Image (cartoon, grey):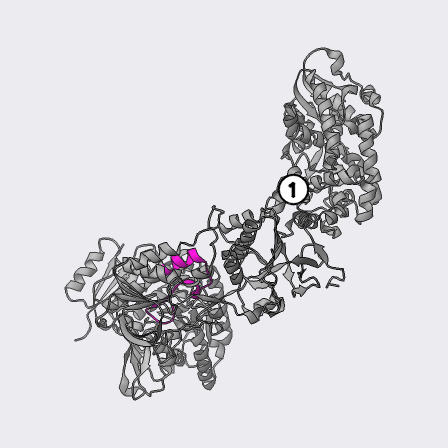
Amino acid sequence: MSQSGLIPLPVRPDLGFIDRLTELAGDSFTQCYQCGTCSVVCPFAFQGTGLPRREMALAQWGLKDELLASPNLWVCTTCGNCARVCPREVDIPGTIRAARELYLLERDPGRELATAFENTSRHGNPLGQSARKRADWIAGAGVEVPIMAGLGRAVEVLFFTECYWSYHPRGIDAAQAMARIMAALGADWAVLGIEERCVADSQRLAGESGIFEEAAAANIATLDRYQFTRLVTPDPHAYNAFRNLYPALGGSYQVQHYTQFLAERIDRLSLGPVASRRVTFHDPCYLGRHNGEFEAPRRLIEAIPGLELIEMGHCRANGYCCGGGGGEIWNSGYTREHVDERLSEVRVREAISAGAEVLAVCCPFEVSLFEDAVKSTGHQGELEVRDITELLDEALGAAAN
Amino acid sequence: MSPRTGVYICSGCSIGESVDVDALSSVAAAEDGVTVTRTSAAFCLEDAQLIAKDAADGVDTVVVAACSQRVNRQVFRLGTTPVRRVNLREQVAWSQPARAEATQALAEDLLRMGIAAATRTAPATPYQDDHLHSILVVGAGPAGLSAAAAAADAGYEVTLVDRAPAPGGFLGRLFRGYPSGADSHLQDLQLESLLERVTTHAKVTLQTSTAVRRVSGQPGRFRVDLDHDGQTSEAEVGAVVFATGFEPAPDQFFGRYGLGELGDVITSVGMEEMASRGDIVRPSTGQPAQRVVILACDGPEDSANLPYVGSVTSMVALKQAMYVHQLRPDATVHIVYQDMQTPGLDELYYRHVQGQRGIFLVRGQAGPVRLQEDGTLTVPVAGSVLGRELELAADLVVLQVGMVPTSDPRSGAQSSLHLDYLQGESLPTHRAGFLDSNFLCFPFETRRTGIYTAGSVHRAQDLAACVRDGAAAALKAVQAVEKSAQGAAVHPRVGDLGYPQFFMQKCTACGRCTQECPFGALELDAQRHPVIEPNRCRRCGICMGACPVQVISFPDYSVEMLNAMQKSVELPEDDDKPRVLVLACENDAYPALDMVGINRLQYPAHFRTIPVRCLGSVNQVVVADAIQRGYDGVVLLGCRSGDNYQCHFIQGSELLGVRMDNVRETLGRLALETDRVQVIETSIADARALPGKLTAFASEIALMGPNPMKGF
């Protein structure tokens, strides 16, 4: 027995496992010098998980069994704040992702993730909704939403709606608001409708690169059939895949997140005063930290008369994770068993203590996560969670009246 | 002949706006011996010629009241004519309110103090003795070989001795060197090329199997007794470089890891030998070692043995992991460490080694090595990032052993110059047994002038650093000879010609000066009176501060001069005009005061500053006299003492502590508050805090009220 009261852990490096990890994630993890800086900025730091420094040590020492048995492996959201501060520039999220992939080669995922993976394979979306209903949200938009297949011509903007804006009730609210904004802009745009399939970047981050690659091949084949100037998406995860992974797979597009597209055109929108409120903005990890866009969403919020933008302590590059990234959106039951508090709940408390009345978001996972957290933390009625499109839509309505 | 003093008051650099220069001229003209006073808007420009002309016309002592003595030294140098500087710029115009009555009073006092000092300054007569352009280098390892080559290249005759039968030092025991910079390959040691520089040099005589039995004399001419396998010989040299290297820490330091008890636990030195034989094996069986664990031995228990850990140990651990990697590519190596120290570009090698397949770095603390039933070993590791003890299986455990300088009595092969000095035959060591006097200000210098140190006896360092170190120490040795030839001091008072004179009739033969000299410059004659070896002297004045009967003085620095300076200050009896005497060390404290002025920070005008060579040179009589005369307080402004001392003369601020006790006793006898005299430590780097410290002292004095001795 040792001082910790645990049986000492025998260290027997599995060199083959290290080789496989290196093939998938590069060898940066071998450079970890065990300083623990990563664990200080990890959103789970307060939970005492040891994430991710434990996992990086296990990876670099080739302790395959211990690494694959670590619950932390399935708790990490790949938010990337660790990699931001790592003095040895280890690709920590990439290494976690690779370890998950190696896990899935030998073992089954948890029930929740298995369901999401299966739904994506079978229906083209992780929610398990019918692929044929993917464009049903259009009906309630109140404006015309052109569908690419029916147009027979090039458009300026191909809008890649992604799953949560297509199916989730609160996502549909944002999608319809987006349609009205596009109409107000007089944009030349269209959506893919039922031809669209889940980009599956979060499934990839959860270790399922097979689903991602299959979906990418299908989406690229579809996109190849149409002519468009730019590809715009509301999902930072899809944006991340289009921007960083699709080019290597044969799909190179001029891609923008919707906040970037709208920020360039904000002067052309006539926005009226909305009910005056203090708004704080939650940076999505895959728009901000992973892809460097911090300004566009803030420019949109600041353009709306009546709103006052305030910042939370964790913002921009040091933004806090909502808890939904890296596949965690589907794995919350598992995670909740291993940590004391959901990240979305921590974040809602931070927004409230910052004095915000509105928590503005621009990632499709976040509205539902945060609305649940507002309820579970007992703050009903104190904090609205709104997508930026909804706030813009409100201001368009105010201008029209 | 009475002195003919010229006083030159500058009004430039805002001095003229701050004080009434004409009034200062009148003050100067009223002093005894002042025959000329002049003013100028800038004495550092063409008007410097006026001073030179006066000196040529018979002015024999010059007072320049202008900027700090630390600037424009060349401008105001007048051959052998003594020049005294009065600081009206940094310490008056730049740190006091302009045109204030107190500012003017300060300037006038400083001027009178300068004139008092100047009139008690005599030209120095340099010590002259013959000298030898030759260097003795002790130790023919990398540092010694490099030193010998450098000194010979500088035209000096070099005697290079080593007690071993062959040159090369520790290099002969190593397999490969580690790279420096971006290169990631193991390095050939290139002993041959180092040796060739020396053996082919006409000016170098290499004597192996030769030990030093005795060294006496002083820089310029040391006498050396050598022993060559029992055959003795004598030599004379101008200076010495001591480069006797290190020995690995003794085995008993590593008992907790099973060294000596478990056959498959070896030291890093053993690893060098094993790698030289071309295979990595278990010594107990001769079978291949597939699992190697390298322990950095840098945990708390280890630091009880050696209180230091350096980058060499870390780099050797990395290098030896590469030995295993290259000789047995299928083996695994774990390096267990607490602190991986790879400064600068060494970080690149750390990363390179860490990236090798099969090499693992484990941060944690190794425990006792245990023998398993099958004859293999396990190493427990506590404190890892996993928060759980680890257990490493090993066929071979390699202990990184520290470097013990051969100056340390614990070294298995202690070496000494056997100095024939009153203060003892060993070179005084600094912390941890290394021969370092002040690594920041005076690397290579030992506390014996003319004897310089290089390589791993100087500090734990690697091959490349030892080679650099040797060359640098050799040049310091050459400088010592050249300065001795002029009768001038070496660092830090480079070129100072005056040396202590003893008024022997009054000497009580107490011997304190001979003990307190930091450099062992004083010996005793048959009557137990001090005898100086002038070329050993660094001119710090600590002997002058030590002497209880004040018989030691320099031509341009004496107790009489310091007392005359403090007495020339006017002590008003008004309660609101306290006067505090500041004795400021000119190495750290005086520049700090200048920095205060340069930053235009202000402090009360009560302070009257006398620059001193070292606080150790302040005889307690000066302090006691000042208090008895009626100063309200005395500040001894000096550098940091203790382990991280900054004293340029090693123990000045330390000795001051002892003398302060005596001063406090005097104050007690006079029924005065002992806090009227205080030591304030400062450095140039924290000059910004100095006005606060002085102001706080002034407030304390104000609370105590005026010195009751005033006016008596």
Residue B669: give x, y in percent of width and height. Answer: 46, 86
Query: Hey, which quadrant is residue B542 in on the image?
Result: bottom left
For residue B143, above or below residue B237: above
Q: Which residues are magenta?
A: B446-470
Residue visible at 57% across and 63% down in the picture? B266
Looking at the image, the residue that sits furthest to the left is B57
- Closest to the observer: B214 or B10? B214
- Closest to the observer: B479 or B17? B479
Residue A273: give x, y in percent of width and height. Answer: 72, 29
Residue visible at 51% across and 62% down in the picture? B269
Question: Which residue is disc 1 drawn over?
Answer: A19
- Closest to the observer: B439 or A103? A103
Disc 1: host chain: A
What residue type is disc 1 on? Asp
Quadrant where the N terminus of chain B lies? bottom left
Other residues around mark 1 within 10 Å, as few (<14) / some (14–19) / many (≥20): some
Looking at the image, the residue that sits furthest to the top is A152
